[in-house]
Image (cartoon, grey):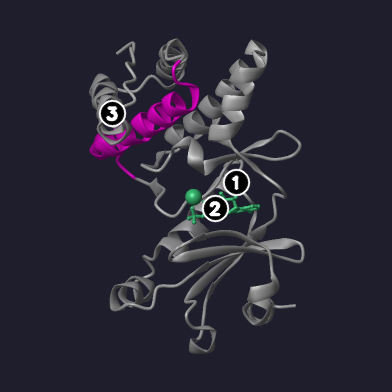
């Protein structure tokens, strides 16, 4: 079955298929042995971005293929489709490997910490660092690099998903702010998962610093990103989390 044929079936049966996520303007649905991520971007801005080949869907498709080449774990990308008008409100789709039932990493890390198995926590942290290191070494940065976009499969394999705003840059020196946001997002989301045991963030940040060896200015900006996230959390929910970062 060609991709458009497959998406036509998804379109016709969508009310009866398992919806994995519905986070406007995106819907992620399971169909046969694949997962289809659909976008609804009918506004003129969406049209212009698609015309220029700069839509988030095209970006995700390109980066998934790049991750595949670099052996960074993400679902295998099968096809990208710009959808003709008969598929409205959907405008674009990516067909990808179905990773099966997933555990989101905020919950996964919480459960590891609760189980008290320190080895497992450290193994998991090391996997997070490996994925982050591989991305950075290949000049790939992402301000959405939080635990929400990491998942664990039933076989306990860690994957990075959702590459809509992931960027491959040519001159990393020009993107220190983005690099800092990537590290800051990872550390903040890590802290939200393990709080109140913030000594873990200190240790994790130490390992991250040692293995990634980012420029000092990046670490400085990453730190202020984390402190700002904690401040926002306090303003919203009165949870006061103090994080001690080794930079
Ligand atoms: N390839 C996949 N296999 C299984 N589940 C997936 C797959 N891709 C996405 N999902 C599920 O759909 C959710 C949303 O996917 P994601 O790409 O993060 O979309 P969004 O951009 O809406 O956040 C994921 O958190 C996961 O639960
Ligand atoms: Mg996501």
Q: In this rendering, does residue 72 appear at all?
A: no
Residue for badge 1: 74
Report the label total: 3
Q: CA gap, disc 1 to disc 2?
A: 7 Å
Q: Residues within 10 Å of mark 1 (few under 14, many from 20)?
A: many
Contact? badges 1 and 2 (CB < 8 Å): yes
Which is more toward the observer, 139 or 123? Answer: 123
Label located before the other in sequence (1 or 3): 1
- Residue 171 at x, y = what percent? 30, 41
Q: CA gap, disc 1 to disc 3?
A: 33 Å
Residue for badge 3: 234
Label located before the other in sequence (2 or 3): 2
Label located before the other in sequence (1 or 2): 2
Magenta residues, as a range?
Answer: 170-196
Could you tell me which residue is drawn at 44 percent across and 64 percent down? Answer: 24
Could you tell me which residue is drawn at 28 percent across and 28 percent down? Answer: 234
* Dominant SS in magenta: helix
Residue 185 colored in magenta in the image:
yes
State left or right for residue 45 relative to residue 90.
left
Could you tell me which residue is drawn at 39 percent across and 69 percent down? Answer: 53
Residue for badge 2: 64
Q: Nearer the viewer, mark 1 or mark 3?
A: 3
């Amino acid at each position: 079955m060609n991709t458009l044929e497959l998406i036509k079936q998804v379109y016709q049966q969508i009310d009866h298929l398992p919806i994995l996520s519905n986070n406007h303007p995106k819907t992620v649905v399971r169909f046969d042995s694949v997962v289809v991520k659909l976008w609804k971007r009918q506004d003129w801005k969406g049209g212009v971005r698609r015309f220029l080949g700069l839509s988030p869907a095209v970006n995700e498709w390109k980066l998934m293929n790049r991750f595949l080449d670099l052996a960074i774990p993400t679902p295998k990308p099968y096809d990208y489709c710009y959808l003709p008008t008969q598929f409205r409100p959907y405008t674009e789709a990516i067909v990808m490997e179905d990773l099966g039932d997933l555990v989101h990493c905020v919950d996964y890390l919480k459960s590891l910490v609760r189980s008290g198995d320190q080895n497992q926590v450290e193994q998991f942290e090391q996997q997070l660092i490996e994925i982050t290191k591989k991305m950075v070494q290949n000049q790939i940065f992402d301000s959405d690099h939080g635990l929400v976009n990491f998942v664990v499969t039933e076989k306990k394999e860690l994957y990075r998903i959702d590459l809509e705003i992931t960027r491959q840059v040519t001159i990393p020196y020009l993107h220190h702010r983005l690099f800092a946001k990537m590290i800051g997002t990872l550390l903040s989301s890590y802290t939200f998962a393990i709080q109140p045991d913030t000594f873990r963030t200190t240790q994790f940040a130490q390992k991250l610093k040692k293995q990634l060896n980012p420029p000092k200015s990046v670490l400085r900006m990453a730190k202020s990103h984390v402190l700002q996230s904690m401040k926002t959390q306090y303003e919203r929910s009165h949870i006061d989390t103090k994080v001690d970062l080794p930079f």
